[in-house]
Image (tube, rainbow, N blue to C red):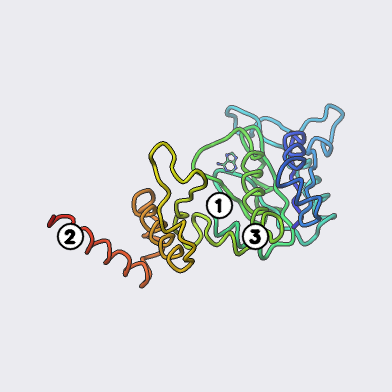
Amino acid sequence: MDFTVLTLFPELISSFFEHGMMARGIKKKLIAGHCINIRDFSCDRHNTVDDRPYGGGSGMIMKPESLKAAILAAKKRTPDSSVILMTPQGTRFNQGKAMEAALQKKGLIFVCGRYEGIDERIYSTLVDEEISIGDYVMTGGELASMVIIDSITRLIPGVLGSLESSKSDSFTDDRLEYAQYTRPEDFEGLKVPEVLLSGNHEKINQWRKNSSLQRTFLKRPDLFNKTRPTAEEKKIIKQWCQELKILVRE
Ligand code: ADE
């Protein structure tokens, strides 16, 4: 997977590529990370990349000429990449989109806007997709692009582990991940559930399904509107009901 980020703050992005998982993925040649400074493509001697909005109003708008030249330069290096514009007006990013990109995309070019926005003519001619990371407005798309690159990269086989290990991630299949424990067995009187010490993998799997379902119910019940409980989950819920009846009777 080849990532290119078009930005007015290249140092923000290059330091992201130089650390942790990103640096390891680049070293292993599983991913590539490039950064293009939009200001390098400005068309005047003052290096201007923004101007006042036609029709008046506050703030500055990013000019189309330099943005277009930067996008074309990125496209020239990786013609198969999709051009993604980071904007709060875009489609909401989620784990499904991260998985889809990790499995299907050869490369992504992120256009990070600053100021009050970018000239409308860029949206309509050069952008394949507009993506938002949530319903709030940041001062630029850089943080959003890093959020997306991080979540895609950790799903690329070989970067962290196998795709297999990400199957238990929260939001895969619209459920939260099960509770996790490590040593010590007893932490200030709070004990690790016994089944996790048993070595019985079938029972451990069953416990984890139960835990994942319970957490989703308590923390993110809205996820059941997206994916209704499966037959297996209904069985677990019935069991909870039986256990609750016993508790109420007692
Ligand atoms: N740029 C500014 N706010 C943003 C958001 N919420 N998502 C993506 N890009 C942005």
Crowd band around label 2 with a 10 angstrom C-alpha radius: few (<14), some (14–19), many (20+)? few
User: Which residue, given by chain and number where applicable, does mark 2 sit on?
Assistant: 246
Relative image position of residue 216 (x, y in whole percent): 39, 54
Determine the residue positioned at 77% across, 39% down.
14
User: Which residue, given by chain and number where applicable, does mark 3 sit on?
Assistant: 101
Amino acid carrying label 2: it is Ile
User: Which residue, given by chain and number where applicable, does mark 1 sit on?
Assistant: 93
- Spatial CA span between label 1 and label 2: 43 Å
- Spatial CA span between label 2 and label 3: 47 Å
Q: Nearer the viewer, residue 176 or 56?
A: 176
Q: Earlier in the sequence, mark 1 or mark 2?
A: 1
Crowd band around label 1 with a 10 angstrom C-alpha radius: few (<14), some (14–19), many (20+)? some
Q: Earlier in the sequence, mark 2 or mark 3?
A: 3
Determine the residue positioned at 50% across, 54% down.
170
Crowd band around label 3 with a 10 angstrom C-alpha radius: few (<14), some (14–19), many (20+)? many
Amino acid carrying label 3: it is Ala
Q: In this rendering, would 1 be left or right of 217? A: right
Relative image position of residue 150 (x, y in whole percent): 65, 48
- Disc 1 beta carbon < 8 A from ligand 1? yes
Q: In this rendering, would 34 be left or right of 197? A: right
Indicate the secondary structure of the residue bearing disc 3: helix
Relative image position of residue 226 (x, y in whole percent): 41, 61
Residue 58 image-quadrant placement: top right
